[in-house]
Structure formats: C-alpha cells, structure tokens
C-alpha cells in the first residue's frame, strides 16, 4: 500500500510538471501574440498617417 | 535613437544585418502550423503508455508496484538526452551558419530538456525512497545527472544576462556544445563506476521480462512523440519572440 503512495506521487509529479509547463508556454505565447498585434497596429497606423515613407 | 541593446538587431530570418534587410517576408513563426500529426498523436500515445505502465506490465516481484515508476522515469531521461542532443547540433549549426533559427531551436530544446531532466530526477528520488531507503544518494548516476541539470540551468541563466543577441547565441552555443559532454558520462556512469543504480541494459542483453520490455518501448515512443510536440510549441514561442524584436526594431527605425 505504501508503495502505491510513491507510485501515485511520481505520476502526480510528472503530470503536474507537464501541465504547468504547457500552461507556461501557452501564457507566454498569448502575451507575445498580443504584443505582435499591438506592434503591427502601431506600424500600420504610422504608415497610414505618412504613406510617403 | 533606439537603445544600444536593441541595435543592430540581427534578423531571425537568417541574414546577418538588420531585420530591415530581410524585406517584407512572412513572420518566422508563421511557418510552424499550430497543430500537426504529432500533436494529434500525443494524447492517444500517452493513454496507451499509461495503460501499459499501470495495467499491462506485470508487478515486479521484489519492488512491487513502485517499480512502475521506471516506465516513465527512463523515457523522461531519454527525451532529456535527446533534447540536449538537439541543443548540441543546433549550437554547432548556429556557430557554422549564424542563422538565428538554430539559436531559437537550441534554447527551445534546452528548456524542454531541463523540464524532462527535472522530472527524471524527482521521479528517481521518489522511487529511491522505498527502494534504497533514502531520497538521494551521491551515486555516480545521480550526481552526473544533477550536474547535467545544473549545466543547462546555467545555459538558460547565461542567456538571460547577455543582452546582445549574437553574443548571447554564440556564448550559449559554446555552453551547449561543451555541456553535452556530460550526456555520455551520465549514460556510462553506471558502467564506469561502482553504483547502486540499477543497470537494466548491459552489453548484450536487457534485464527485463519481455512484457516489461514492450511496456518500456511503448513509453519511450510515447514520450518521444510528446517531446517533438513540446519542442515545436516552444520553438514557435521563440520565433514569435524574434518576431516581436523585429517589429520593435521596425517601429524604432520608423521613428
């Protein structure tokens, strides 16, 4: 029975680490996507304001 | 005038000059599709691996059910080695070609490798407590693995302190190449030195029952698929980061 506790703990660690890492990638990706959109908007607005450049 | 750390900002697209030299090309991250065959394979592969490890594999006679940790512990260590192998190759390629894509691949593989090494260390420690009666032992295999983890954590720390992108890529490439020397040392440590770590694969045989070998192979395949998927996701993130730098530079030059 005690051995099952260790087995459960090991599998919990694996899936928790994998989940946390996947969420971390997702969160960082969302933040970068927002920044890319913002920068693209800024550049597009600038181009619209001064199309000669 | 842009800040000194931002200029000249090398292009992630492979040119050595400014990003403006690259012209109006698609963003590098756009070349990576969000979902692939590998992505769809991850969940079924992991379900099969879990079934094989928990139900298909027989109960080990001496250690009991705790031995089942082995089926996930070994694949985690294997994909960590694979990840550091990718860092090694990508670092050489960066120094050879100076294409930023290789640096992005190297840092992505290093981060994923650290994650898998952490899991291998922690699951090994959890297995050791009921088996050896201790959470940790300064055994050659454990010590060299901890050193491996520290090498790649240092790799990430080095990247965070060097501001110039080209210098950062080159310095970390050297660490990525030299650090890889520890991978064969970790693998051979249980053969070169006296150890309490189990030696499953000897020169000419695998000390496991046939069903255990099948389970191990299934788990190795599942984790390799998962590694490829995670690496793709992490690489996409790194390429997006480069895209942000490129757009920032465009914004700064336009001012």
Image: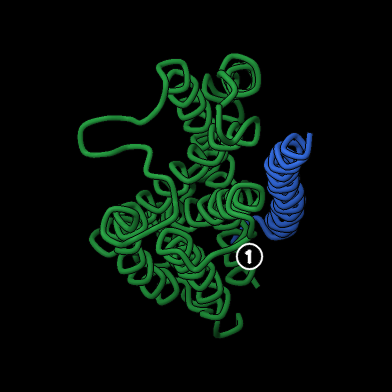
Q: Quadrant of the N terminus of chain B?
A: bottom right
The foreground one among B68 and B46 is B68
The chain letter under disc 1 is: B
Q: Residue furthest left?
A: B204
For this view, does B26 lie left or right of residue A48? left
Q: Colour of chain B?
A: green
Query: Are there few (<14), some (14-19), or many (20+) residues within 10 Å of tag 1?
Result: many
Compared with B234, B184 (above or below) is below
Q: Is residue B13 visible?
A: no
The foreground one among B26 and B124 is B124
Q: Residue furthest front?
A: B62
Q: Please report the residue visible at 52 percent of the width from the left and 39 percent of the height from the top.
A: B232
Q: How is the image coloured?
A: by chain
Instruction: Give the x, y percent position of residue B52.
Output: 58, 18
Instruction: Give the x, y percent position of residue B189.
Output: 33, 58
Identify the residue position indicated by label 1 in the image.
Answer: B248
Instruction: Give the x, y percent position of residue B235.
Output: 52, 46
Task: Give the letter of the blue chain.
Answer: A
Q: Please report the residue visible at 64 percent of the width from the left and 56 percent of the height from the top.
A: B133
Q: Quadrant of the C terminus of chain B?
A: bottom right
Compared with B211, B27 (above or below) is below
For this view, does B15 lie left or right of residue A19? left
């Amino acid at each position: 029975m005690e051995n099952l506790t260790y087995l459960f703990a090991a599998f919990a660690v694996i899936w928790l680490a994998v989940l946390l890492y996947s969420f971390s990638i997702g969160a960082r990706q969302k933040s970068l996507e927002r920044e890319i959109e913002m920068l693209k908007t800024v550049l597009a607005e600038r181009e619209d304001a001064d199309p000669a450049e | 005038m842009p800040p000194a750390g931002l200029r000249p900002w090398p292009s992630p697209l492979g040119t050595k000059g400014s990003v403006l030299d690259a012209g109006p090309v698609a963003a590098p991250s756009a070349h990576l599709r969000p979902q692939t065959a590998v992505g769809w394979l991850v969940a079924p592969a992991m379900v099969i691996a879990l079934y094989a490890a928990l139900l298909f594999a027989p109960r080990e006679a001496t250690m009991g059910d705790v031995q089942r940790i082995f089926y996930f512990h070994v694949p985690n260590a294997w994909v960590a080695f694979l990840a550091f192998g990718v860092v090694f190759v990508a670092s050489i390629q960066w120094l050879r070609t100076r294409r930023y894509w290789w640096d992005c691949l190297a840092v992505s593989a290093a981060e994923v490798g650290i994650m898998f090494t952490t899991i291998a260390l922690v699951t090994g420690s959890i297995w050791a407590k009921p088996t050896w009666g201790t959470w940790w032992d300064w055994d050659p295999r454990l010590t060299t693995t901890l050193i491996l983890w520290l090498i790649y954590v240092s790799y990430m720390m080095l990247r965070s302190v060097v501001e110039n992108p080209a210098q950062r890529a080159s310095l970390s490439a050297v660490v990525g190449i030299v650090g890889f020397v520890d991978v064969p040392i970790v693998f051979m440590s249980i053969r070169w030195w006296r150890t309490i770590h189990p030696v499953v694969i000897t020169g000419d045989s695998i000390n496991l029952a046939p069903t255990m070998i099948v389970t191990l192979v299934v788990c190795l395949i599942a984790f390799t698929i998962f590694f490829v998927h995670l690496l793709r996701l992490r690489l996409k993130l790194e390429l997006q980061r480069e895209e942000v730098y490129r757009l920032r530079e465009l914004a700064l030059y336009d001012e």
